Image (spheres, rainbow, N blue to C red):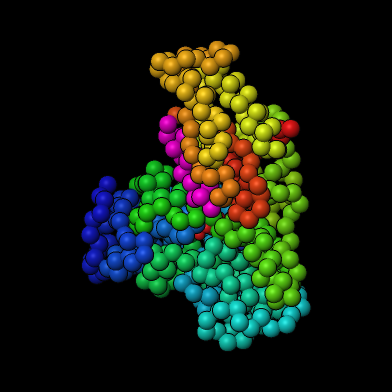
């Protein structure tokens, strides 16, 4: 493993970065002003069909040339990802939509609404986003104009240029324009659209730092661009634009409320979301048996078990006090069974659980908790930040899960927070990380 190795010569042969099978080289880059030489080399690797992990504003992505079927297959192999789970195609700018999407008159209807002038979409004139006439072009223009570059992914009709491996054979392609300067720089240097899933092992906790990528994929990726922690920490929101409707497929970093505000301005109907606060909440369970999925998988990646740490995660929903009490009981039971218990706590809760951690340090020097605790059992905590500051909670969430795993937690307990704004995505990730083990309290 070479860290911080110079790759400033864009014409150097790729072997300088290690064997083609992936040496897992990490190169540090300034997240605001990444070195042009490093980006040029990374872009060259992408064009050569190799894999580059890079930071986006949401999470780290594992990138490959989206037009190169063999390279895309390498992404699936590296992650151990099911071929049925399609990838997001990243573009440097909205103008590049033309290269990856298709006109869709034949498959999708929808009325054109009043003009969405003033959306902020830079240069394309009317009718130039798609290569053909698309009834919902105005709607796409409105959303792209407001949210790109940024963490909104649009599912649109796919161009034949995009291999079926990218889209798992679907007639649609998921597209976004990331705003992170390293992602932007890489896309521009590569000169091709980049297909990139989150850079973690399939179904596991997403990678929000280069160290997470190394942990999961080191040795299977040709280059990791280390631009520091991902600023948002939660993946993009995925919506499908169809006719005159915008359907939520995955809650994420852009809130449904924010999308609704923009849609309302353009005179479009609000986002269509499946019922229930969390898309991942498949009916609430009191036991460990995961319930069966309630909805057809409109987005094939919306697996019930996803984002999961190695430890068993229990997610407690309901009024805060009841959820905290249920968490405390579950933690006590796990401790009594000799487990190491990880608590994912927002700041105000941390104070309330302090007695648990203080009472039962591993090694047995402190007082055992009431009720008796087996030898070696203890409690470890990760602070998610202020309970009301969901941006901080979101930024820390995946990292905190990984830290509890690294510290040897057998069971992790977390409780639900408000599901407004970013809270919907946080709730979704915790529900899926729990693999359906949602305990309704109160
Ligand atoms: O923030 C993000 O979106 C990150 C960064 C790297 O951009 N990427 C990411 O990719 O989260 P991934 O592969 O972990 O999740 C992509 C999601 C999956 O739920 C997948 O099923 C869905 O997007 N998706 C992709 N193409 C789709 C399509 N054609 N139709 C419906 N859903 C699609
Ligand atoms: Mg993912």
Is residue 236 among the parts visible in the rendering? yes
Magenta stretch, main secondary structure, is helix
Relative height, residue 432 to residue 358 (above, below): below
Q: Residue at x 63, y 32 (%)?
A: 324
Rendered location of residue 78, percent (x, y): 44, 49
The residue drawn where x is 71% and y is 34% is 440
Give x and y (percent) for residue 124.
55, 84
Q: Is residue 437 visible?
A: no
Q: How many marks?
A: 0
Image position of 35 (left or right of 278):
left
Could you say which is closer to the camera, residue 50 or residue 138? 138
Range of residues picked out in magenta: 391-407
Q: Which residue is depicted at the point 48% across and 19% down?
A: 360
Rendered image quadrant of residue 135: bottom right
Residue at 66 percent across and 60 percent down: it is 256
Residue 260 painted magenta? no
Foreground pick, 3 / 75: 3
Is 79 or 56 nearer to us in this picture?
56
Q: Quadrant of the C terminus?
A: top right
């Amino acid at each position: 493993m070479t860290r911080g190795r110079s790759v400033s010569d864009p014409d150097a042969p790729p072997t300088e970065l290690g064997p083609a099978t992936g040496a897992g080289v990490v190169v540090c880059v300034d997240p605001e002003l990444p070195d042009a030489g490093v980006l040029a080399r990374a872009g060259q690797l992408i064009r050569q069909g190799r894999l580059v992990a890079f930071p986006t504003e949401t999470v780290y992505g594992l990138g490959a040339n989206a037009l190169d079927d063999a390279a895309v297959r390498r992404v699936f192999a590296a992650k151990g990802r099911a071929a049925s789970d399609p990838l997001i195609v990243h573009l440097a700018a909205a103008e590049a939509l033309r290269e990856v999407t298709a006109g869709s008159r034949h498959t999708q209807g929808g009325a054109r609404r009043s003009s969405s002038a003033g959306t902020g979409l830079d240069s394309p004139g009317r009718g130039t986003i798609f290569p053909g006439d698309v009834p919902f072009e105005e709607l796409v223009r409105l959303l792209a104009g407001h949210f790109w570059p940024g963490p909104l992914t649009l599912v649109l009709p796919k161009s034949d240029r995009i291999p079926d491996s990218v889209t798992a054979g679907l007639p649609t392609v998921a597209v976004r324009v990331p705003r992170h300067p390293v992602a932007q720089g890489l896309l521009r240097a590569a000169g091709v659209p980049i297909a990139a899933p989150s850079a973690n092992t399939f179904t596991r906790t997403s990678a929000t730092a280069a160290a997470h990528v190394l942990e999961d994929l080191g040795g299977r990726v040709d280059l990791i661009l280390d631009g520091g922690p991902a600023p948002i920490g939660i993946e993009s929101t995925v919506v499908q634009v169809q006719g005159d409707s915008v359907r939520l497929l995955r809650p994420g970093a852009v809130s449904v409320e924010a999308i609704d505000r923009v849609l309302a301005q353009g005179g479009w109907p609000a986002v269509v979301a499946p019922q229930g606060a969390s898309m991942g909440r498949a009916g609430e369970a009191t036991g460990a048996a995961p319930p069966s999925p309630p909805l057809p998988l409109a987005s094939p990646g919306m697996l019930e078990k996803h984002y999961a740490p190695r430890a068993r995660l229990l997610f407690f929903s309901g009024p805060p006090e009841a959820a905290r009490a249920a968490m405390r009981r579950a933690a006590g039971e796990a401790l009594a069974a000799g487990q190491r218990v990880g608590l994912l706590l927002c700041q105000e809760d941390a104070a309330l659980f302090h007695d648990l951690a203080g009472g039962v340090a591993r090694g047995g020097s402190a007082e055992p908790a009431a009720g008796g605790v087996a030898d070696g059992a203890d409690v470890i905590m990760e602070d998610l930040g202020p309970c009301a500051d969901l941006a901080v909670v979101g930024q820390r969430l995946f990292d905190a899960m990984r830290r509890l795993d690294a510290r040897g937690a057998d069971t992790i307990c977390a409780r639900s927070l408000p599901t407004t704004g970013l809270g919907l995505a946080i709730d979704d990730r915790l529900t899926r990380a729990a693999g359906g083990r949602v305990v309704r309290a109160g």
